[in-house]
Image (tube, rainbow, N blue to C red):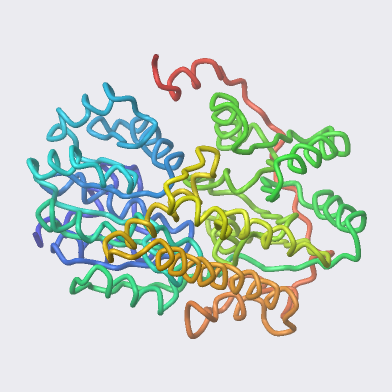
Amino acid sequence: MNQLHDHLEADLQKFFGFSSFREGQREIIESVLNQSHTLATLPTGSGKSICYQLPSKLMDGITIVVSPLISLMIDQVKLLKSQGFKRITALNSLLNYQQKSQILNHLSEYQLIYCSPEMLQQPRVIERLKQVNVSLFVIDEAHCISQWGYEFRPDYLRLKDVIQLIGEPTVLALSATATPQIQDDIIEFLDLDMNKIIYPMDRVNITYNVIKSDNVVEKHEHLLSVIERVKAPTMIYFSSRQVTEQICAQLQREFPDRSIAYYHGGMEQQDRLLIQQQFMLGQLDIICCTSAFGMGINKSDIRLIIHYHLPNNIESFIQETGRAGRDGEHSVSVLLYNKGDEAIPFHMIESELPDDKEIKRYINNEIDDELPEIKQRFLKFQKDLAEKESFTFHQSVEKIIKVRDQRRMVKSNSVFELLKWIHTEQCKRQALFESYQSNTRPAKFACCDVCDFKLKEWAIKQDITEKHSVNWKTILDELLPTK
């Protein structure tokens, strides 16, 4: 095994074309190759995926990667295949029976399998995994395990049983937004002796700014002012698909010399892939998007992240701002805020949790097919727990309402944290990360608008106007699945 460690840089160059590791990557990979169960946190944009993709090439057996986002796993598989990885696939709910059977019947031929957590609840999948050698079990977005986290997912709580059923492989739990409390929660739940590798989450090259407005008109003026001065790859986040399209159209009129497009989850897959590839390849200067865009996007030279709407929680804000400056160069986060913006995330919280009537109907087996998937997931998990305890109808309803109210409190507190951060007169960087680490590192460039940065004096005119001719039909044909 030590011999393997001596050649890690050469392996990195051979398989991925990188000459050196980023902070934390080598330490995590060595821990995994030593077959140590590992909990690791790295800041967004630090290359977490390399920490299991490289070991999958070096270890005997199969690496399973559990990911909560189907779109992300599809993107990762396509990216790796385009880089020459052949023995890789994804198991998720988008596959039909024939496609799933094809993968399950040839499991041993794969090195790396991305899998949604719900697929690991299917007996047929577990039975096949028992028959092969699973050497590494990766839990991506491991904070989803913790009930104290905003993004808690009940189906993650079943992973402990899955690990035991498939032969107790080495476990790697990864997160970019796990507080110390959530880290302890993950280890306690998995009940494993885990090697903790915790790196600071703050990105030293990102400067944080908040611009407060009295109304939407003033907010829009601030947006135009920033974009006018900053001619560099830019992402603008919105909470509404409709507003995303509206502002995009306005910016296209205001800045005819820029290439601007929008992206959200309501678009056709082919259109989403086209926009994504155009942005990655430098054909687009500005992208107006919802949170559906960004996960797995590894564009190194994004200089500006603007939040037009308040994010749903502080974790999402950290993740989304972390998409800037992955090349280590100076990049800026701007959050535009006017009083009342918090109504959107609070509305989102209510839309994700069932009301009393929906709980009673579900427990009474009056299942509404039009109930959003996120509510159905919550209700199914809680109902299963109630049935295991042999609860009566009234006991089940009472218990689920209590859990629902606890989830509402956790989610609401995260919005309040973000509001507190917006209005703080202390260092923005320190305040943003104080729940995650005891101290922040010195900023590489400017720190924040409280400490030493004046956004009005910041301007950048990066050369982003040169657009090369690209055959998009060929690119999309390669990315889209064959019929």
Looking at the image, which is closer to me, 305 or 216?
Answer: 216
Looking at the image, which is closer to me, 246 or 398?
Answer: 398
Instruction: Where is residue 9? Give x, y as percent.
Output: 26, 54
- Quarter location, residue 91: top left
Looking at the image, which is closer to me, 345 or 24?
Answer: 345
Instruction: Where is residue 43? Give x, y as percent.
Output: 46, 64
Q: Is 94 placed left or right of 340 in the picture?
A: left
Looking at the image, which is closer to me, 365 or 478?
Answer: 365
Q: Establish if 173 lies above or below 438.
A: above
Instruction: Where is residue 472? Give x, y as percent.
Output: 56, 19
- Quarter location, residue 453: bottom right
Residue at 26%, 46% (x, y): give it. 120
Instruction: Where is residue 80? Give x, y as percent.
Output: 35, 36
Q: Is 114 placed left or right of 426 in the picture?
A: left
Q: Establish if 173 lies above or below 278.
A: below
- Quarter location, residue 357: bottom right
Residue at 26%, 47% (x, y): give it. 121
Q: Is 86 placed left or right of 257 in the picture?
A: left
Quadrant of the image containing the C terminus: top left
Residue at 73%, 64% (x, y): give it. 342
Q: Is 370 placed left or right of 381 in the picture?
A: right
Q: Establish if 14 lies above or below 162.
A: above
Residue at 13%, 63% (x, y): give it. 34
